[in-house]
Image: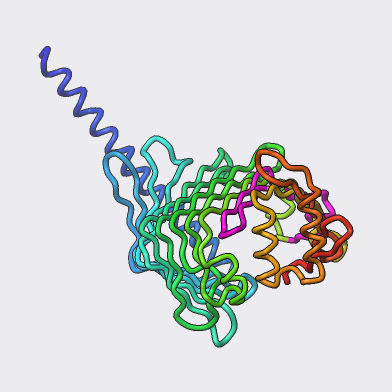
Amino acid sequence: MRFLYPVIGVLALFVLYTVYWLHAKSTIEVQVASWIARQEAAGYVIEQDRLRVTGFPYRFQVELTAPQIQAPQSDGAWVAQLAMLKAHALFYDFKHWIVEFDGPLWLEYGEAPATSLELNARLALISLVSNNLGETTRIGAEFDDFTVTPVTGDVPSIASIEKLLLSGIVTEEDTLRVRLEASGVSTSASAFTPDVLRAFGQTADLARLDLTVTQWATLATDADAGAWSRAGGQLQIAESALEWGPAHLAGVGEFTLDAAARADGRLSLHITDPDALADALVQAKLVPAENEQALRLAAMMAPRGPDGVALPFRLRDGGVYLGPVRLGDIGN
């Protein structure tokens, strides 16, 4: 009996855990079906060949085989199809799910003739953490060897990214903080003019951005940038960096929108080699030739530090200004 009691205890625990796992599996299936029903009620069309929950005994894994999602016209009417979608969670923590994409992902969007893309990645993971109310409060993503192959229609600006890392958190102060870092970012040949590609090259070694968005709930609810701006929303860049050919930049700034929904704010850039960047900007015809000397003079007179030259830029009235000189228009 001395040896029998522990064996009986272990068997009893195993039976209880199996009952718990099966109950949780049934609950997850109901919740997934309920989520799909809510999306379809909102106008989405979601189809899949098979839905199953596996992973016994250590975890839960929701598998959607060949899922296809079609968005309603109000959300862009895009269509996405994937070979396999998996979501993992440990048996003791249903607030943290890791979503894994098994590609390729076929994406179609836009009016006829529609644009069709094939997206691939050696690794594609998204981490989602929610609170007790089921609201997502933290998100993370990791993509390795991400490629975009155009099939029909317009060619996207990004052709491939060697590594992409993203993390985001919504704080109790209604602020979204996002940190993004991408390395080996290659653009498509048609993304920029030949002058820009000759001056900067087709691949950026590094792009990094750390920003916060205040009044996040106002923006997330209806995606109304005007309402967000009127509520006092700001986009604050705590850190940014770009290494693209002769452009070695780091910067901070803060922005909002003016009454015409145009970016309004300031950006302070630290430029490692301002002369090389000025040459590249003029060669790429991003700065009009008549402003070349003003740009060089501002770079020469700006204070120098260990990170290079600091230049204060101002965005207002749809333009980019360095001091009183308008360097160009936003978006041009």
- Position of residue 318 relative to residue 26, above or below, is below
**Based on the displayed image, in which of its 4 quarters is residue 9 positioned?**
top left
Q: Is residue 313 magenta?
A: no
Residue 251, position as x, y percentages in the image: 69, 48
Q: Give the residue at x 74% y 52%.
A: 218
Q: Residue furthest top?
A: 2
Q: Give the residue at x 50% y 60%.
A: 185
Q: Residue furthest bottom?
A: 113
Residue 189, position as x, y percentages in the image: 52, 75
Q: Is residue 235 magenta?
A: yes
In the displayed structure image, the side of residue 30 where residue 176 appears, left or right: right
Residue 10, position as x, y percentages in the image: 20, 25
Which of 31 and 74 lies nearest the eye of the viewer? 74
In the displayed structure image, the side of residue 86 where residue 229 appears, left or right: right
Residue 175, position as x, y percentages in the image: 69, 43
Query: Where is the N terminus found, in terms of image quarters?
Result: top left
- Position of residue 282 relative to residue 249, above or below, is below
> What's drawn in magenta, residue-wise?
224-250
Query: Where is the C terminus found, in terms of image quarters?
Result: bottom right
Q: Give the residue at x 50% y 76%.
A: 108
Q: Give the residue at x 73% y 42%.
A: 304
Which of 137 and 276 lies nearest the eye of the viewer? 276
